[in-house]
Amino acid sequence: MKKRIKLYGILLLLSFLFFAANVNAKEGDEETIVIKLGYYEHYMPFCGKETEVDSAGFLGKIIDCMREDLKEYGVEIECIAFSSKEWLRQALAVGEIQMMFPAYENNLTAEENGYILSNSLLDANVLVIFHDTYPESRDKTIAVASKDPIQELYIADNYPEAKLLYYDTPLECLEAVKSGAAGCTIMNEQIAEGLLESSGGLQELKFYSALTDAGICFAIRKNEVNLLSVINHEIHLLPDDLYESAISEYYLEQSRTGYVEYAKQTSFYLLLTIPIFLLIIRALSERWKKQQHEENKKRLLAEISHDMRTPCTVVNGYLKAMQSGLIPEEENDQYMKIIQIKMEEILELLDTFHEYSLIEHPDLPLTPKRVDICDVIQRYLAARYEELELADFELEADIPEERIFCKIDEKIFDRVLNNIINNSLKYNPPGTLIFLSVRRCADKAQILVGDNGVGISKEIKEKLFTPLYARTGPRHKNSGSGLGITIVQKIVEAHGGTISLVDENETENGTRYCIELPVSEDIGE
């Protein structure tokens, strides 16, 4: 248990301090001794201006503890905020204040600056860590761990013009230095040495001691030796977890008052920040879309090479076998038919991938015209009726006599119906019913198209519109590029519409798509 010095001893010490330091007494109370403490008002979480006579942050907690103890002896601490570190040091030098906070240095640098230091409130030896050599230019970009106020305090004092790169942890700071993303990092000696010893990949980093035997202290005028004794005594009585408590409260308060609360208190700035915020969101969204586009392109190229390889390998193998005489001449026609089938597969894949690349392009060239969507679908079904009949598929159409106008590029939109109906033909047995209906719903033209066939597995339904995903499912194990429905979606969306898969609870079986397009009311639209 920490022992207090005896009452008469500290009273004697403070009385001597009063006469030696010429401390001002409060008006109307000659026995009250006032210690003037200056602090920098912009150094949270260490200190910051809370009221005219009180500091916030770590210093606020220290003063609260000291006042509780010193008031018994008729001593008070008056806190004076300074907006400039230079003015703060000057005030200490000329005797306007008797002590200042914070001082982040060691006794050697303090003596050079003309004051003495109290016992350390926090140990703060500092290492500068770098890679290879350490030219001056390395100071210009410094990796900083988020929520490390001691590190920020040292950098603010010694490298005010440096560019700071913030990372979540000290380890990430070291990795940034190793990779060259940052010129150096500056951190607590114990933390740095522990990380450098435990992480084998970081042992190539070098360092030097920027500040040794240092700490966060009070700086006191040289002639205030008795005051130094009193402050050191009070520091000895402070709780061990005072700093951790102050830091935790500061960051908790920061998270509570966040952007929304700040915006409520400052409505003028909110009006200014909303457009900026929206621009940032838009820029991030565009960046994400670009990244997704690049990833899709890479994946597409990988799938092309995979899909092309199989039929090409078959064709190459058969041709070599025919050239070498391994295949009897009477069987050549049979193998040539197989080669022809594989070549048609290759051409179909190339056409699909080429079409997808065109549809995926942000500048898809559309030439929309105002047309009667009912008439367009009737003509499309008439053109395919014979093909469906020969394949032994039934067709059921429900198209109203009323005219429903939409603005579409007919040639490109035909691909929507083609891909859906071709899937029905490809993956269902003969006798399957293909149906198509059109109706108007408010300002939308609704097209339902599908079949009563085998349906689609739940796994594929969840990611049906993801490029190349559907090709991996059981329904698509025999063929298909996995892009057909993706192309349909891109075309529909390019026309300002939407497409969705009708929930299986609404249909007994099979597959049904719902396409909605905006209705064009006015010819002049």
Image (tube, grey):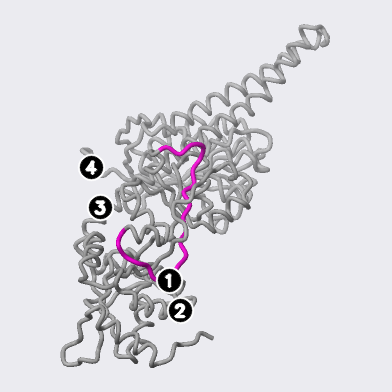
What's the residue at 54%, 37% (across, down)? Answer: 421
Name which residue type carries label 3. Answer: Pro
Whole-angstrom CA distance, mark 3 to mark 2, is 52 Å
| Distance from Cα at disc 2 to Cα at disc 1 | 9 Å
Q: Is residue 81 magenta?
A: no
Quadrant location of the C terminus in the rendered image: top left
* CB-based contact (under 8 Å), mark 1 and mark 4: no
For the magenta stretch, what is the residue range? 113-135
Whether residue 21 sits left or right of residue 503 in the image: it is left
Quadrant of image for the N terminus: bottom right
- Amino acid at circle 2: His
* SS state under label 2: helix
The numbered mark, 4 or 2, whose residue comes first in the sequence reads 2
Q: Residue type at mark 1?
A: Asn
Q: Which mark sits nearer the N-terminus, 1 or 4?
A: 1
Q: Residues within 10 Å of mark 2 (few under 14, many from 20)?
A: some
Whichever of callouts 2 and 1 sits on the residue coming sooner in the sequence is 1
**Residue 48 % position (x, y):** 29, 69
Pointer 1 residue: 119
Residue 522's disc number = 4
Q: Label 3 belongs to which residue?
A: 275
Question: Do labels 3 and 4 touch, CB within 8 Å?
Answer: no
Given residues 376 and 194, the one toward you in this image is 194
| Numbered circle sitting on residue 236 | 2
> In the drawing, does residue 503 fall left or right of residue 183?
right
Return the residue found at the far left.
Answer: 27
Q: Is residue 132 magenta?
A: yes
Whether residue 270 is situated above or below residue 275 in the rendered picture: below
- Secondary structure under the numbered disc 3 in the rendered image: helix
